[in-house]
Image: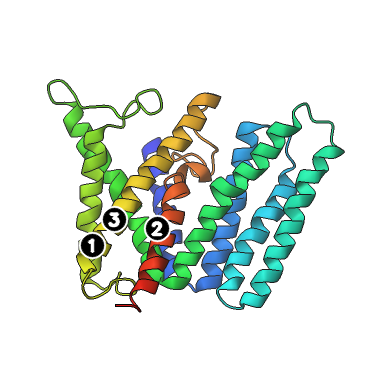
Amino acid sequence: MSEFWKRTLSGAVYVAAIVASIVWGNEPLFVALAALLAVLAVRELNRLLHPRNVSDRLCDICTALLILSAGVTGIYWQHGLLFFAAYLVAIIAVLILELWRKAENPIANWGTILMGQMMVAVPFCAMIALLYLDKWLLLALFVLIWVNDTGAYCVGSLTAKQKGGNHKMFPRVSPKKSFEGLFGGIAFSIGAAYIMHRFGWFDKIVANNYKDFVVILFALLAGGFGTLGDLMESLMKRTIGVKDSGRFLPGHGGVLDRFDSMLLAAPIVAIFSWLCYAWSFLV
């Protein structure tokens, strides 16, 4: 099978799994998928930063406990607190373990462990929080991220062919990303958000007098912070000197490569959505 078809097939399976777990599955199904993907992503990050110096199994347990605590809280908050308490015990134990291990740089190990939780596990928890608010909001976030990437690529590629080229954002980090692509991707996202709005995807968070503002800002946050998350992961990989974070998806790289846009977008959009939901009761 050619590389093109491998990339197409694996991408289609990835999109289908995400959409099915959100729309046709139930909350536990997405939580289970999120826990699996978060564990794999944290493991990729650990191996990129400090191969063989951080315990994969212990970090796996910590990550899974945090994701499960977010998932269970949406159904039984008392049980969610128990999972979170277990997570705190586990993460403290992982940090204290460095006292007994003979690692060359325990400080770097601590940083790697905490970075994995903040950079990967927390964004996945934010996705779950958005899911429990409304599954269509979570699906909208994914779709807007994908539309933004596609729009940025199309506009950036077209403007790069013009005389004088386009204006690069951070050529040291990602030589192909341009301001033209950034604004083009956000424009595509806003257009897609309006289409979703017509089908009621944002009904849970829009107040009568602020519908357009909420839809536009949702798209801006998804596209803008999605691009920044992508750039963050690109900076990390360029610093380390690798192309992909792993080989989870043929032709697409690792789990971290597929969810890099969610690193900042998911927490920001989740906070924004819950604030809008609370505000809708006051107007």
What residue is drawn where x is 31% and y is 29%?
A: 176
Type of amino acid under label 3:
Ala
> Disc 3 or disc 1, which is closer to the eye?
1
SS at circle 1: helix
Q: How packed is label 2: few (under 14 Cα within 10 Å), some, or many (20 or more)?
A: many
Cα distance in 3D space between marks 3 and 1: 10 Å
Residue 77 percent location from the top left of the image:
61, 75
60 vs 19, left or right, is: right
Q: Identify the mark nearer the N-term, 3 or 1.
A: 1
Type of amino acid under label 2:
Val
In the picture, the quarter occupied by the C terminus is bottom left
> Disc 1 or disc 2, which is closer to the eye?
1
Q: Quadrant of residue 149?
A: top left
Residue 124 percent location from the top left of the image:
52, 56
Which residue is denoted by mark 3 in the rendering?
219
* Residue 24 shows in the view: no
Which residue is denoted by mark 1 in the rendering?
213
Q: How packed is label 1: few (under 14 Cα within 10 Å), some, or many (20 or more)?
A: few
Vertical arrangement, residue 182 with respect to residue 163, above or below: below
Cα distance in 3D space between marks 1 and 2: 14 Å
| CB under 8 Å between discs 3 and 2 | no
Cα distance in 3D space between marks 3 and 2: 9 Å
